[in-house]
Structures are given as C-alpha cells and as structure tokens.
Image (cartoon, rainbow, N blue to C red):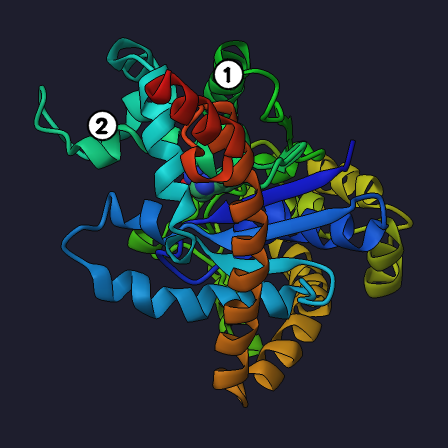
Amino acid sequence: MEKIILTGDRPTGKLHIGHYVGSLRRRVELQNSGLYDKIFVFEADAQALTDNIDNPEKVRQNVIEVALDYLAAGLDPAKTTLFIQSQIPELCELSFYFMDLVSVSRLQRNPTVKTEIQMRGFSGESIPVGFFTYPISQAADITMFKATTVPVGEDQEPMLEQCREIVRRFNYIYGDTLVEPNILLPDNAACLRLPGTDGKAKMSKSLGNCIYLSDSADEVNKKVKTMYTDPSHLQVSDPGHLEGNTVFTYLDAFANDEQVARITGDYATLQEMKDHYTRGGLGDVKCKKLLMEVLQETLEPIRQRRAEFEKDIPAVYEILRKGCEVARAAACQTMDEVRKAMKINYFDDRALIEEQARRFQK
Ligand code: TRP
C-alpha cells in the first residue's frame, strides 16, 4: 500500500514558532525522508470559515501568509502538494455522504468539539451545523487522499478516531474502499505545545505572546528579553527552577548540545547548563542570550527563504493553484471509487443500463 501523508492548518493567522516545533519542522523532515510516496499539506480555509463566518477577509489574507510560512519553513512544492481545501469541491460531496454514517450523539461526544463549543460560548443548540459537523468534513479531507499517516498535535486525536470509525463503517457497508489513517504525534514533549513568551499555556495571537516565523531578528530578540522565567530567581546566586520556565522550555525545543557548547563556550550540554541554573549562579540574561542565538540560527534561513518568495507573490499563488490541480485529480479518482461502491455511478455502468433495458423490454 502507498504511504501517504496528509495534514493541514486553518489559515487564521501567521504561523509561529509553536507551529514550527509542533508540526512544521517534522513535516519538512518527513518530506525529505524519502519514506513516503505522496505528501499533501493543505490550508483548511473552509474549516476556518466554520468558525469565522463574519470574517472571510481574515481567512483570505492568511491563506497567502500561511503559504509563505510553509515555503519558508522548507516545504518544497516539488515534493509536497500544497493546496487549498475550498478549491476541492469533491470534499463537500464526500462529507455529505459521510453525514449518513455519523449520529448527532457521536459528534456531541467528540471532546475537541465539546471544548470548542464551550470556548466559543455557543449555548444549547445555537451552534452552527457546519461548525458542529467539521469532524466529518475533516474525515473527508483525510480519506479523500487515502492518507495513511496524519501528523498532527494531540488535540486532533479525537478527529482521527472519528475518522477511523467513519472509514470502518463506510467499508463495512459499501465494501473496502477507504483507508484507515494513523495519527503521528510530535516526538518531543517540549514540542507538544509550546507555551507563550509570557509563560501562559498556549501561544496565541490574542494574548500577544507569540514569536512568529516572519518576525525580524530584532523583534525576536526583543520578545526573548521580556520572556517569562522563574519569578523566584531574583539574584544570580539564587537557585533557579526549570519547571514552567519558558526560556528552558524553548531551549528544550530548539537547542541541541552542539549549539549549547559552541555558543556558550561554558557547557558541553544543555543539561550541564540546567544543572548550573538549578544550583544557582547562572543568570537569566545568559540563558536568554543563548536562546536568542539558537532561535536566530533556526529562524534566519526561514526568514531569508520567505523574503525570496515575497518578491514574487503571483508565483506563490501559482504554486497553490498547481497543487490544487494535483489534489483535485487525486480527489476525482477517489470519488469515482466512492460513487461506484455506493452504487451511484449510473452513467459509468454499462451493465446497469443494459440490465434495466432488458427488465423493461421483457
Ligand atoms: N483541524 C486542524 C487544525 O485545526 C486542521 C485540519 C483540517 C486538518 N483538516 C485536517 C489536519 C485534516 C489534519 C488532517 O489544525
């Protein structure tokens, strides 16, 4: 069986370093590993609209931002098909058929949907149907491309479980047609969810605690300078704490020992530096200096690639358009198989037409 990767993001904002360590970096590694037959990465603009009905302009603006972030991070259109969800109408078609396979109570039990309903303050049954059913549409995204591997964060686990159920149900009713996907979770604990620069659990635009992939070197350094560390570490000689110390969480996510040794000249490994910090005698400023250097080493090549692509924005749209064409061809192929399995392929089925003709002629 072909090994196929599919994953995507809602284009609701520029991507930040949390996205980078949580998913983007891994995608680029997977892309370059040569282990996969096909890779699809897409912008879930239609899904973003389920939750931004009154703000289509926001989604429209961020489609190009996210495309630039993808390309800057190293996704290569020669190896990875980059496309936009709304441009693949077959996804709506497949979602519609999937809706017959899922009950309202099953959707209500989806923990991600549950929390999102609460977060957005929908009460009772005022939730828009499109929003409520987006796990079904997401199952269509995944199965349309016969994805075997879906690299996403742990918050997407319920979506994948629901998708697998739909696949099993579909294949049971209509015969083996669709592929059950596996989730691929981030491998480093520090990367599961990078906290904001203020130490809050999550990076989010509304909290203003993000470092964006598109931030300038100065912006990054400024943000690192104000980062949350250990509030009880008042004097350099005080013992410091690593728990909840955002600078060390970021170092775990970004720094390797080679960098620590080369940049500090004082420690062979990150662990040695942490030991010094917890013993006391190591100031926050030094730790932040290291983090700045490490972040710049990661972000500078990304910034440079972004600047190159920004010079020719029409070419970036062209990359997306071509990606949509490739994705659409794959989608049409799957839908042919789905329609055949569901017995709604009337005009492709000579035998059916002849059989009906005989029946009526007698
Ligand atoms: N729900 C995902 C997110 O918010 C985006 C997404 C939509 C997705 N369809 C997908 C991810 C299919 C993986 C596979 O990040």
The C terminus lies in which quarter of the figure? top left
Which residue is painted at 53% across and 28% down in the image?
351
Question: What is the three-letter code of the residue carrying label 1?
Answer: Tyr
In primary-sequence order, the first of circles 2 and 1 is: 2
Q: Quadrant of residue 13?
A: bottom left
Q: Are marks 2 and 1 in contact (CB under 8 Å)?
A: no
Q: Nearer the viewer, mark 2 or mark 1?
A: 1
Helix, strand or loop status at disc 1: helix
Which residue type does callout 2 highlight?
A: Ile
Residue 333 vs 221, above or below: the answer is above
- State how far apart marks 2 and 1 are (Cα): 33 Å
Q: Secondary structure at mark 2?
A: helix
Relative placement, left or right, of 265 versus 191 is: right
Quarter occupied by the N terminus: top right
Residue at image mark 2: 117
Q: Residue at x 34, y 57 (%)?
A: 208
Nearer to us in this view, 179 or 247 = 179
The reply to whether residue 235 is in sight is no
Left or right: 98 in relation to 318: left
Report x, y in % for residue 223: 48, 64
The residue drawn where x is 31% and y is 66% is 60
Q: Which residue is disc 1 drawn over?
A: 174
Q: Nearer the viewer, residue 313 or 192?
A: 313
In which quadrant of the rendered view does residue 6 lie?
Answer: top right
Residue visible at 37% across and 33% down in the picture: 95
